[in-house]
Image (cartoon, rainbow, N blue to C red):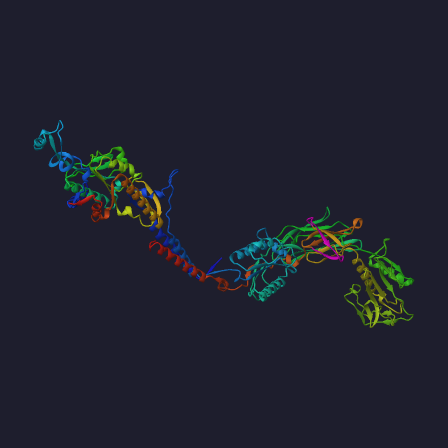
Amino acid sequence: MPENFRQSLQQGEQLGLRYALTLPQSALHGQRGERLGRFAGSSVDFQDHREYQPGDDLRHIDWNAYARSDQLIVKLYREEVQPHLDLILDTSRSMALADTPKAAALHKLAGIFATAAANSRCSHAVWTTGEGFNRVANDTQSPSGWGEIAMESPMAFEEAFGLLPPRLRRQGIRVVISDLLWPGDPLPTLRKLTEGAAAVHVVQLLAEEDVEPPEPGNVELIDHETGETLSMYIDASTQQRYRQTLKRLQQSWHDAAKQTGAKLVTLLANNIDGSLHRLEETNTLEPA
Amino acid sequence: MPVFTYPLAWIAALSLPALAAIYFLRHRFRKQRVSSLLLWQMHKESREGGRRIEKPKLPLVFFIELLVLLLIVLAATGPRWQIPTTTRKLIVVMDDSQSMLAGAQGETPRALALERLRVILKERNFSSYQLIAAGPTPRAMGGKVRHPAELEDQFARWTCQSPGAELQQAIGFARRLSQEALAAKDRKESDILVLADHEPVGPIPPGRVVWEAFGKPRLNFSFVNAARTAHLDEDRCLLEIANGSAIPGTNTLRITAGTNLITQTNIVLGTNSTRRLMFALPANYPPLHAELGPDALTGDNRVDLMPPLRRQVRVQLSVTNTALAQLIGDTLEDTGLRSSTNQPPALVIHQSAAKPAGAGAWGLRLMPLPAKPERYTGPFVVDANHELTSGLTLLGVTWGADPGATNAAGYLPVITAGNVPLLTHRAEANGQHQINLRYAHGENHSTLHKTPQWPALFWNLLHWRTLSQPGLREVNHRLGTDVAYRAMDSNATLTSPDGTEKSLPAPGRDIRLPISAPGVYTVASGPGTNRLSEKFAVNFIAGEESSLARASSGEWGKWGTKTEIRFEYEAFLPYLILLALMGTVAHLYCINRHGGRV
């Protein structure tokens, strides 16, 4: 991993100490852990009584209640679960656009989310796009211990999702960090992401160069992902049309997010530190 | 074409490529990586059939700046444009004489002059153009035209067939046209261009006259004289050949009559020398054709001589006095003009008071005299312009006449002795003529009939009568002279040497035949079987024109200095400045519209 990315990851880890991942109480589910779950479990927190049924743990029979009512009543305790965060990173080449802080911001955000998840006593897994989705080495550890996050995938996010989707944990929290700049309808992608998820947060990470078109003049545009080129003359009207197209793309993602219950927030890579409050506003993160 | 007062200012035009280079370097395709072309798909085009070559597109301001720079540079050169309101008229005086055709094809003064004229027309604009052909008399070759291209049709009419060119007269005509235009509305004197093959004789006429000559001294043999006249029973022929050039040379003379070769000989002539050939041919011998070998000018190398006319007059002599009748009869015979045919008389010599009968009969009445006529020795008053007095001198002559005679009403006195009319003439309305002669022929009264003036008087009378007969007066003419013809009716047909026929109206019977080129012509008039058809020859005989010794090339006079001419053109500097300012405003607007970015 390049040193600057490593530094960004560490900076994200530092920043993440201030935040905790916002957990949706109603949908918490997971492996046995440290947080109280929605269902009955084996914690010490009493939840309810019910009639004994064969197979119930005899240790949970409320003998006092039996003495009073001559009925076998068992005490139910709340389960203790450990929520899980699936951090899905779009590591296609477009996220490593040259001369932009996009890749660094991606690393920083990944560090923030992983640390915030730890602060929320969540386990986490980090997925990156490549020939399908792959786990980052040592991703269960703190970000500084992660293996390299390769940013050279020529495959678009949606394409990789179709080839080899990530094995996402059910009822987990899923955070997707991507620039969302790929053709196609965002609704199917979001439906796949939200299926069985407790919550889905989509963070659109854009560089200043993505938001603002190039200066007027003759420009040969090179698609950083595919290498495809397009020569054109950019003037004020072209710039205007570009901004409108970006706006329409974002609107389509917003609409799809609204339909699927996902939350979408757009961050500017050039000012990632100043944009973190947007994550708090959308209840993605909360102060630790 | 515009002219530039300060052409060195064009150096500033180097700023144009510099500006273009700046913009090109600035606006060439710069490479820029983007996350995805997704958002640029609106501009993506199908690449089926190959990749389209994208040319760098430059902003509008570049073109505005380029235009403004160009306008400023153009303004700095001080351009002036020739527009009709500021230019002058051009009047071209073109030498229409044969010498303009001397030389090989394409090298003749005419060809060179035309070439030069086209160059001038290309270089300069004039408000209008007028061509004047300078022949024996100046003639306009066409109307005034506004565009040089319209002159091409008129150039074809510049045939150069005239036997001479009165250039001074043509220049005077051109100057008069110029002054008329000056007085009218043009306010500017016209430019006059003279195209000739020799230098001007004397100084160039004042005014805006440029004389350009394109001639070269060349060897040229030519006929300078040719005649065939009737003399008794034979025709006398005269041919005179000259070498008018400054170079001695030889040539071949070939003379034929019909299919008969009369002579063929080499002629060697020095500078400015002539050779004369005289020979006789039987009367009514076929037309004579003489031709010289080819040289610089071919138009003067041939002559045709038709058999001369031998017109005679049928005379009826009705004189009772035997001696007088004998005297007049002998005189008429001696003139050789009296016809002996049985045709109705054309002239009746009588003593009676009655006029001769017959439509075409003229009358010469011998007036009655007193028994003792008066002897007049002069001075005689003679109407020298009358046909009857041609060559007549009455010095020393004694003329006997009636001292009490008075002129009858309607008669014009031709010869009088004091107030005594001796010979009077009256022209009738029907074309007849009545002449009254008072002459006492007795030995004691007059001596006129013993002098040569007596037959001369009768020769004049008969010759005059022959001239009034229908037909040609002469059959051999020089080009440029009038060919007089009396038609039999009110229409005549002229057949040119090339076979083209032209119908000529002759309301007054006497007409001048329109001849513009040498050759053998046929003219005919009259009805049906009485139709009179005659051939006549027109020869290019002009010694001065054939002499190419004084042909030269050069240019004389000028219309003004180049600066003077240039400042006559319209300066359009203010318009350029105005346009440049408008361009600057447009530039500012574009810059402002794009937020100060280019």
Where does residue B148 sit, x and y in percent of width and height? Answer: 56, 56
Q: Nearer the viewer, residue B428 or A106?
A: A106
- Quarter of the image where one finds residue B167: bottom right
The answer to whether residue B137 is visible is yes
Please state if B503 lies on the left or on the right of A117 as rendered.
right
Relative to B364, is B21 above or below? Answer: above
The answer to whether residue A124 is visible is no
Where does residue B196 sit, x and y in percent of width and height? Answer: 59, 59
Please state if B6 lies on the left or on the right of B291 as rendered.
left
Where does residue B219 sit, x and y in percent of width and height? Answer: 61, 54
Q: Nearer the viewer, residue A71 or B357?
A: A71
- Quarter of the image where one finds residue B47: top left
Residue B166 among magenta residues: no
Q: Residue furthest front?
A: A69
For the record, the magenta segment spans: B497-514
Relative to A197, is B483 above or below? Answer: below
Q: Nearer the viewer, residue B73 or A284?
A: A284
